[in-house]
Amino acid sequence: MKTVLITGGAGFIGGNFVRHVLRAHPDYRVINLDKLTYAGNLASLADVADDPRYEFVRGDIANAELVDLLLARVDMVVNFAAESHVDRSIMDADAFMRTNAHGVYTLLNAAHRHGVERFLQVSTDEVYGSLAPEEAPWTEASPLAPRNPYAVSKAAGDMMAQAFAITHGLPVVITRAANNVGPFQYPEKRVPLYITNAMEDRSLPVYGNGRAVRDHLHVEDHCRAVDLVLHEGQSGQAYNVGAGNDADGVALAERILAAVGKPTSLIEFVADRPGHDMRYDLDSSRMQALGWRPRFDMDACIEATVAWYVNHQDWWRPIKDSSDFRAYYARQYPAPPPALRRAS
């Protein structure tokens, strides 16, 4: 049996990938290393906790001693561990640099020392910066031009991974994905925030004029892509993973409100994010050449995600009712002037 170390496996995408690997590869063992920061939630993995092929280890990927012990036991590494919310990185980037840059170095160093057969660094489209409306989608050859502290920290991790591939011959692959949506996403992120706020008859905070465009990739499609690159990707290469499910903030809010059956009067424009990237768009030709295609279009993405949050209120309501979340929300979305509220 092969053993895969999945870091950040108690988070949104990592947890879905833990479940995917155990389902798709019955001859694999999984070690889940997670620090259990505010967005880590073992309740998301209750259905696999008793699987004899699954092991959870609480710890930090920047802890060199722990990482070294674990890397001696594994064949492959998939690194999802990251501080991942742009808004929080703007407030304070220290944790982002520690985990997303130094933590990646710590993992790579141990992987090189123990000769792992594959290291997959999970990254983001945000490392490329921001596109103007008329610009062509990014390819993997596009320059890295991050514009916010989160994106900078992820780009640093990518560049270190590529350096280990070039300098040490470490069999590294990188995936750079669009905005993920789906089950178990922490409700600070835009899609689950809009869904849950709508269910609570609370306003949906839309940044600026609401015209920043994002691609929405269902997490199950992302997991399939990561699995494929892990096993069939070319060492030293990066792979863009986009679904073509583009929508700006206003269109997304309107879709979600329609799905939940709530009025557009709940849309509320708030102060724009500092340095807001206005458009992301990925050319996924290299990924598609491996045989991958997204299965969820935009309608299916929103429909499935709304249904999950409607049916799993016991998972997200305790999070949103916590004092930590309420304090974050009040700090991030101070009450705007009434004139900014969108008319129904």
Image: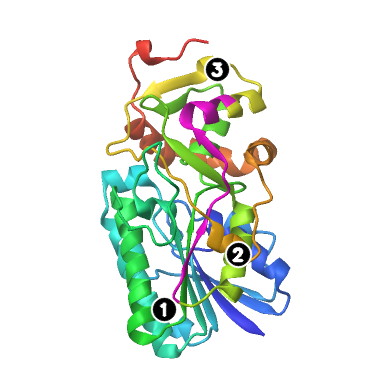
Where residue 344 sits in the image (x, y, percent)?
Answer: 53, 10
> Can residue 41 be spotted in the picture?
no
Q: Position of residue 251 (x, y in %)?
A: 53, 27
Q: In percent of the image, x 39 and y 55: which residue is there? A: 83
**Inter-mark Cα distance, 3 to 1:** 48 Å
Disc 2 crowd, CA 10 A, few/some/many (<14, 14-19, 20+)? few
**Left/right of residue 162 with respect to residue 79 in the rendered view:** left
Of callouts 2 and 1, the N-terminal one: 1
Q: Is residue 220 above or below residue 342?
A: below
Query: Element type at marker 2?
Result: helix
Query: In the picture, which quadrant includes the N terminus?
Result: bottom right
Residue on which the image places disc 1:
67
- For image coordinates 37% across by 15% down, the residue present is 340
Q: What amino acid does circle 2 point to?
A: Ala
Q: Residue at position x 48%, y 78% from top? A: 235
Q: Earlier in the sequence, mark 3 or mark 1?
A: 1
**In the rendered structure, which segment of residues is drawn in magenta?**
236-254
Question: Which tag is nearer the camera, tag 2 or tag 1?
Answer: 2
Residue 199, horizontal then vertical, whole percent: 60, 27
Q: Amino acid at mark 1?
A: Val
Q: Is residue 277 above or below residue 8?
A: above
Q: Is residue 241 left or right of residue 130?
A: right
Q: Are marks 2 and 3 in contact (CB under 8 Å)?
A: no
First reached walking from the N terminus: tag 2 or tag 3:
3
Q: Amino acid at mark 3?
A: Thr
Check disc 1: other Cα within 10 Å, few if <14, some if 14-19, many if 20+.
many
Q: Is residue 308 magenta?
A: no
Residue 289 numbered tag: 2
The image's mark for residue 264 is: 3
Quote the CA–CA distance across marks 2 and 1: 34 Å
The reply to whether residue 198 is visible in this rendering is yes
